[in-house]
Each structure stands twice: as structure tokens, then as C-alpha cells.
């Protein structure tokens, strides 16, 4: 099981200029399974709030490869399902440290919403806590 809290540090709409922090917060809860000692599949779900107001709800499947005991690469695919569907590519790289059955993580991602033909670009940071059963 996992819990995550993320935010967009910088954002550039298609054809537009870069903007800073988007005043957003995404809270996710998820479940994952180890396929091999270094590869895991995950499915996370949760809402995004912008300036404290509900913005969207997303499902986020992902594939995580642990290439070092304290570092990993992630291929995530955000699928906003409310208010409208889209597909957001969300690759990232993260740091982690296991403490028994608990592991905090910090992940830096780039994102691009490609599902509607108008790709944008974003940079986000996500902190998480995994609990292994």
C-alpha cells in the first residue's frame, strides 16, 4: 500500500510560456505488487485540488524499476477520469530508503498530457510512503 502527495513545480501549456508552481496538490492512495525483486506494478487513485478547490480525479497505473537500493525509475500513466478523460505520460526518477516495512520516497517527474492532441509539459515533485505487507 502507498500514499503520495504531489504538486506541479513548473508548467508550460502547448505553445505557451513557462509558469511556476501551479498551486495544486494531488493526494493518491495506491496498491502495488512486486513482479521481480526490482520491478513492481502499481495502481494509484486520487483527487487533485487547485488552490484548495477540487479539479479532477485520476487513476495512475505505473511500472517501477529499482535500479539501486535507494533509487528507482518510474513509468506512470495518469488517466484523469473526472471531469474529462485524458492521458498524461508521467516518467520520473526517485529516491527511497527502506526502514523495515516502511519506505519514504521522493520522486521528480516530467509530464505531458497527450491524450487530446495538445501536449503540454510539466515538472512535478511527489513525496510518498510505502508500507510493505
Image (cartoon, rainbow, N blue to C red):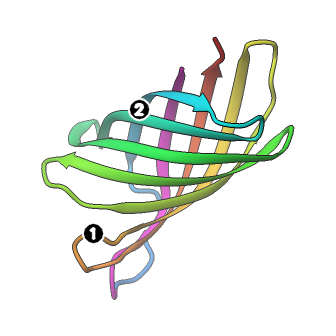
Is residue 11 positioned above or below 69 on the image? below
**Which residue is more in the foreground, 67 or 29?**
67
Instruction: State the image coordinates of residue 95 (x, y, percent, origin top left).
Output: 76, 43
The residue tagged 1 is: 115
* First in residue order: circle 1 vs circle 2: 2
> Which circle marks residue 27 in the picture?
2
**Bounds of the magenta segment:** 1-15
Residue in the image at 66% along x and 16% along y: 132
Give the quadrant of residue 11: bottom left
**Residue 1 appears left or right of 69:** left
- Which residue in the rendered view is the most extreme toward the bottom? 15
Where is 99 relative to 104, above or below?
above
The residue sitting at 46% across, 57% down in the picture is 21
92 left or right, relative to 113:
right
Q: What label does residue 88 carry, if any?
A: none
* Secondary structure of residue under mark 1: loop
Q: x%, y% of residue 104?
A: 70, 27
Q: Residue at x 81, y 12 (%)?
A: 100
Amino acid at each position: 500500500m502507498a500514499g503520495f502527495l504531489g504538486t506541479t513545480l513548473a508548467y508550460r501549456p502547448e505553445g505557451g510560456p513557462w509558469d511556476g508552481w501551479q498551486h495544486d496538490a494531488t493526494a493518491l492512495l495506491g496498491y502495488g505488487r512486486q513482479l521481480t525483486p526490482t520491478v513492481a506494478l502499481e495502481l494509484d487513485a486520487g483527487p487533485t485540488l487547485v488552490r484548495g478547490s477540487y479539479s479532477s480525479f485520476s487513476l495512475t497505473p505505473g511500472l517501477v524499476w529499482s535500479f539501486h537500493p535507494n533509487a528507482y525509475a518510474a513509468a506512470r500513466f495518469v488517466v484523469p477520469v473526472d471531469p474529462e478523460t485524458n492521458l498524461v505520460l508521467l516518467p520520473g526518477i526517485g529516491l527511497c530508503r527502506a526502514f523495515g516495512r516502511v519506505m519514504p520516497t521522493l520522486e521528480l517527474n516530467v509530464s505531458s498530457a497527450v491524450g487530446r492532441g495538445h501536449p503540454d509539459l510539466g515538472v512535478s515533485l511527489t513525496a510518498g510512503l510505502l508500507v510493505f505487507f
